[in-house]
Structure formats: C-alpha cells, structure tokens
Image: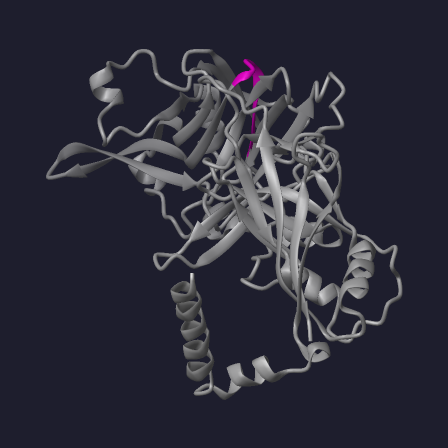
Amino acid sequence: MKRAYKLVLFAVLALVVSSCNDTEQLGLLLQPEGDKIALRMDTFTVETQNAYVDAISAQCDTSSMALGEFYDAKYGSTKAELLVQLAPPVGYKFAPDSLNPTPDSLVLYMYYDSWFGSKTSPLELSIYELNKQPLVYDQTYYSNLNVADFTDQSILMGKRMVTSVDQTLPDSVLNDNNYNPLVRYKFSKEQLDRFFAIPHSAYASEEQFAQYFKGMYITTKYGASTVLYFNQIDLKLFYHYTYNKNGKDTIVNTSIVYPANKEVRQLNKFSHTDVLATTIPDSVVYAKSPAGMFPRVTLPIGQIRRKVRSEIGSRLFNVNSAMLVVEATELQTGTLAIPVPEYMTLIRRSKIEEFVTKNHIPQTADSIAVLGTYNSKTKSYVFDLSYFLNSEIPPHYVNDKTDETLELLLVPSSVVLSSSGTITSVRALRKMGAVTLRSGTNANSPMRLKVIYSGF
C-alpha cells in the first residue's frame, strides 16, 4: 500500500514540475477559485411542429427536371409537371427556297439518368403548347405557379404512355453502360408543318423565337407510381433540300436542335394531394420533398439564457458546442420506399424565402443556416448550432428577454460539391424524399439540443 502511495505522489510531483515549464498551465493551477473558467453542459428539449410548404423556386436545374406522380399512403401524393422553353439556334440560316427545303419530322427527346418509383407501371405524358403569356427569363417563379397563366391547354401537341424502364429492350441493352434512357415522341405532320412554318426571322434571338413558339407544358394524366428526372430535353427538326450538281439532283438531309438549356427557362410545378389523410402523432414530425413539409423547430433561447446565468453568473459567456440531434424513426422499407434525404438544412424561418430563391449556402460558421448530413448508422442528423447561440447570446449578454424563442425550419436539401469537396450549391431538394423524425415531445428520445458552454 505504501509503495502504491509513493508512486502516486511521485506522479503528481512530476506533473507539477513539468507544468512549471508552461506559464499558462501554471497560471491555471494558481488561479483563485472564483477566477477559474466555469465549464457546463446542459440538454434542452425543443418544440417541434409539422409545417406545410407553399412553394420553392420553380427554376429547374437542367440535370433534374422532374415529371410524374407518386402516391404514398403515409406522405400523400406528389405531382411534378414541367414548363419548358426551347432555345433556337440563333442566326441559323435555312436552305433558300430555291432548293425546296421540305420538313421530314419533328421529334422530342427527353433523356433521364434517374427515376423513382415503379419500373413497370405506365405513365401517360401529355404535351401542350404554351399559348398565353411567355416565360420571362429574369423573373422569379414559384413551384405553385398557375399553369393557366401560360396555356389554356387547347393545343395538344401529343401524348404517349411510357414506363421508367423500357420493357421492349433486352437486359443486355438496359445494362450497357452507354445506354441512356429516354422518352422519344414523334409529333404529327400537323405539328411538324406548323413548327416548320415559323419564319426564318424568328431565329434572330431567343426573344424573337418565343413570339412564335413559347414552349411546352408537359404533364401526366395517368399513373401515380413513377417520377422521372430528366437531365436533357431536345426538340429536333429534320428536313431535307435538293440541289443540282453536275446536272443531277442531290438530296441533302439535315436537322436543327432546339435544346432546353440555360439560355431559356425550365420550370417545375409541384403539387400535393391526399396529404396526410391521417392525423400525425405528437411524437413525430414529417419532412417531405419537393416542396412538401419542412418541420418547424423552436429553440428555447430565453430558457437557455436563464440557465446560463444561473450557472455562470455575470461572467463572459461562450458556447463551445451546441448539437441539435434529429433522429429518424419509422423508416420505410421496400423497393417503393421514398428515399430519406441525404442532407437537411436547418434555417431561420425568417430566411426561408431567401433560401428557396437565392440558394443560400451555409458556411462553416453561420447564424442563418446550418447543414446536416444523414448518418445511416445512427439514423440521425446532427446540427452544430454553436454559432447560432453565440450570435443570440453575445459574450456581454444582459439578462433580459428570457422568454424569447428562435424559430427554424428543417428543409430536405441537395448539395453540390466541388472536386476538392467544397460546397458550391445548396438547394431545397427537388427530388422525392421523405423522413419521419422524432419530435420534441417524443417519449423515447425527444429532439434535443446538447450545449457545452463556458464562463470566464
């Protein structure tokens, strides 16, 4: 026993001697009791509420133009429709009339590299010409836009049934790395002649062309099991002309491509029906995209302030860590399970419009928005809100407004990373996504904020 005591004593003396070489550590050891840094840890439950979303930005990314409809017994029905402008080849010169240019076909190509839902359930696509007001390039549109403002749906350009996986193709083609799924539609001769009759002067600019062809409204009339995500849409006009060479007529076959690209507008309309036919229990909240439900999270800022002051008195204050734990539950399984969003943005409710229109990018330290990534092992998102709290409770905080709260929204999001791993874009998720989250009143594991703070 004496030997053990001596060993402990020697260890303590060695620690003290080595500490004397570091003036800062020595200072800490010699500090009066009242001057020591006070380090505390507390856990606060938060209030939560289901919140429906009116709209997000309608402007599509050309890599995710959504079209289709999907019904889920838990989360309701989501429908995605498209309004698409086409860019003409500005300055294009047709063969002169003396060479008798003649139209052959007008074909729409809609390519997609991903989809959600059933691979065999049919989906009927209907294509209408926009015949009312045009899409304005620099105007902000929202995903709850009124289609009737742009078309009366009196000009049906065409319709056809499709499936997400082309059942007419063999597996060898479908599994080929070079295979690019697409929806192809050949328009009628009537539509071909009408399009070919657009005057050549319209090719002077996108604005001139839009006076003669404003674009297309593409919707679905049948099927509620599939959503396609188009990454390229092209309209292609095939025609030929004839010229005489060495006394012999020669036919030249050519074509023009009208892409839906960044030079013109592509808009998504999202709508939800049969949403939440059953009452949501108080123990959970739902997050759903696109433009479905963004749960509201209310932080008890006043309660945190009271607790801080009761622990550290009048000392200066700093939040070292503040982790909001958001746990998923009741996860769906099966081939038609709606994917859990990979990312979630926690953003001030007052800044949501700026986020859906300007695509605000959360920084490493940000008091507007914080990004969380889904951890499939822990089945949770974790958000570091230390910067939030430090901005809400400054170091020289005076103890007033103790009943104040801060309202935030949880937004399913998509993230684009650079080659170096830097975040270059954060947007409200435009693809199907849904997750059930434990609420602030969940009996098993409530949504909570774990705060480590110090006074000095």
Residue 174 image position (x, y, % from top left): 27, 21
Identify the image quadrant of the N terminus: bottom left
Residue 206 visible at all: yes
Quarter of the image holding residue 257? top left
Asked whether residue 213 is in view, the answer is no
Side of 186 relative to 331 (left or right): left
> With respect to residue 119, does 134 lie above or below?
below
Residue 240 percent coordinates (x, y)? 29, 32
Query: Any magenta on residue 242?
Result: no
- Magenta stretch: helix, strand or loop mostly: strand
How many numbered marks appear?
0
Which residues are the magenta region? 216-225
Q: Position of residue 289 (x, y in %)?
A: 60, 34
Determine whether 334 is above or below 325 in the image.
above
| Residue 167, picture quadrant | top left
Examine the rendered structure and indicate whether residue 61 appears above or below residue 50.
Answer: below
Residue 451 percent location from the top left of the image: 66, 56
